[in-house]
Amino acid sequence: MPTLSELYKLDGRVAIVTGGSRGLGLEMAEGLAEAGASLMLCARRDEWLTPTVAGMRRRGYTVEGAICDVSRPVDVQTVVDRTIASFGKVDILVNNAGVTWAAEPEDMPLEKWQKVVDVNLTGAFLFSQAAGRDMLRRQWGRIINIASIAGMHSSVQGPHYAAYAATKAGLIGFTRELAVSWARKGIRVNAIAPGYFHSRLADGAIALNEASIKASSPIPRVGDAGELKGVAVFLAADASNYITGQTIVVDGGRTIA
Ligand code: NAP
C-alpha cells in the first residue's frame, strides 16, 4: 500500500491552471507546485501573469506562463501545444478561469450573458477537449473544474447573477458527464464548489453579503487563504484515485445549513 506522502506527491506531473495569475487559481497552482508538479499558468492579462510566474520561479518552482482567453479555441490549443512542447504532456487541468457580471436578470445585456457562458462554461469545455486528447493518448489525466456554491443553491439576499449561477450549475453537470465518458480511459474529472473567498472577483459580493454569510454559515466566516489548495492537490493526486464525477463543496457548511 502506498504511504500517505506518496498518495499526495505530484512529482513529474504537469498541470495547466487557467486563470492561475491571481486569486483562487494562483492558490491552487501553488499547491500543485508545492506537491511537485510543473505548471503552465494562463490568463488574459500580462500585468498579473508575468509577476506571478516570476514570483513562483524565484521560489524554485518550474512554471511557464501563457496569455490566453479560454473562450477562444485557437488560444486554448496554443496553450496545450506549448505545454506539451515545454513539458512533454498534460497530466492535470484545472479549469479555474471565471468571470461574472453583476446585473439583475431583467437588466442583463445579452452580450454579458454570452461572455459569462463563453468563459466559464465553453472555456472549460474547450480546455478539457484539447488537454483531454493528450490525456486520452496516454490514458492518464486529472481534470478539476472550479464550480461554485452559486451552481448549487440560491439565496433571497442574492447576489442574483443568473448567468454566473447557470454556468456554475452547468459545470457540475459537465463534470459528471466528462467523468463517465473518460473514467475507463484513465481520466478522472471532479469539481470544487467554493463558497466565498476574498478575490478580485468576489470582494464586491462579499462586501454586500458578509453579514449574511456569517449568519447563515455553520463556520461563520468567508474562506481563508490556504483552504482550497489542499483540496485541489487531493483531487489531482493518487489520494483520490477512486473518486470521479464528484463536486467537493468548500463553503464552511453554508449549503447544508
Ligand atoms: P479572480 O481573482 O478574478 O481570478 C480570475 C482569474 O481568471 C484571473 O487569473 C483572470 O486573469 C482569469 N481569467 C478571467 N477571464 C479569463 C479568460 N477569458 N481567459 C483566461 N483567463 C481568464 O477570481 P477568483 O475568485 O480567484 O476566481 C477563480 C475561480 O473561482 C472562478 O471560476 C470563480 O468563479 C471561482 N469561484 C470563486 C469564488 C470566490 O469566492 N472567490 C467562489 C466560488 C467560485 P485575467 O483577468 O488576466 O484574464
Image: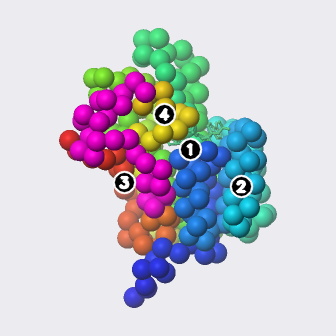
Spatial CA span between label 2 and label 1: 14 Å
Q: What residue range appears in magenta?
A: 207-232
Query: Label 2 crowding class (10 Å Cα cut-off): few <14, some 14-19, many 20+?
Result: few
User: Which residue: 38% across, 35% down?
Assistant: 150
Q: Earlier in the sequence, mark 3 or mark 4?
A: 4
Q: Nearer the viewer, mark 3 or mark 4?
A: 4
Q: Are marks 4 and 2 in contact (CB under 8 Å)?
A: no
Spatial CA span between label 1 and label 4: 10 Å
Q: Earlier in the sequence, mark 2 or mark 3?
A: 2
Q: Earlier in the sequence, mark 2 or mark 1?
A: 1
Q: Quadrant of residue 35?
A: bottom right
Residue that mark 2 sits on:
55
Indicate the position of residue 56 as horizontal and vertical percent values: 69, 58
Q: Earlier in the sequence, mark 1 or mark 4?
A: 1
Residue that mark 3 sits on:
248
Q: Are marks 2 and 3 in contact (CB under 8 Å)?
A: no
- Ligand 1: quadrant of the figure: top right
User: Which residue: 28% across, 42% down?
Assistant: 220
